[in-house]
Amino acid sequence: MSLLANIVGFSLFGLAARIGQLGIQKRPILDNPIGHAISMGTFGFIGYWAYQWDQRAAVLLQERRAEIAARREKKEGLAPPSST
């Protein structure tokens, strides 16, 4: 997923959460547009953070898999050949 799609998706979820909140309170939906902007901005930042976290986790997993593969190759190279 691209960064922009992640931020926009989370922002729209924030807007939906804000509209749901106002609906529960039975308040007018367009009463305070600044609240919508704050909610969308906050959730957009969470989307940005989630994207960065996902990218960093992918790099860490790739490094870890390479370490494991190197250890396996080293272990197989040190093991005596089987006599079967």
Image: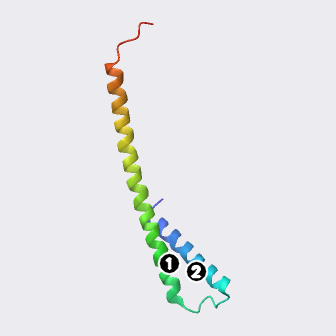
Most foreground residue, 34 or 25: 25
| Residue type pointed to by label 2 | Arg
Q: Which residue carries the number 1 mark?
A: 40
Quarter of the image where one finds residue 19: bottom right
Most foreground residue, 39 or 7: 39
Q: Residue at x 32, y 21 (%)?
A: 77
Quarter of the image where one finds residue 70: top left
Mark 1: which secondary structure?
Answer: helix
Q: Which color scheme does this rendered protein use?
A: rainbow
**Image position, residue 7 (x, y; %):** 47, 69
Disc 1 + disc 2, Cβ < 8 Å: yes
Q: Is tag 1's residue or tag 2's residue first in the polypeptide sequence?
A: 2
What's the distance in space between the residues labelled 1 and 2, CA to CA? 8 Å
As displayed, is residue 13 above or below residue 55? below
As displayed, is residue 55 above or below residue 28? above
| Residue type pointed to by label 1 | Met
User: In this rendering, would 73 be left or right of 7?
Assistant: left
Most foreground residue, 24 or 44: 24
**Image position, residue 54 (x, y; %):** 43, 56
Mark 2: which secondary structure?
Answer: helix
10 Å crowding of disc 1: few (<14), some (14-19), many (20+): many
As displayed, is residue 78 above or below residue 23? above
Position of the C terminus, as image quadrant, is top left
Q: Which residue carries the number 2 mark?
A: 18
**Image position, residue 25 (x, y; %):** 65, 86
Dot label at residue 29: none
As displayed, is residue 32 above or below residue 47? below
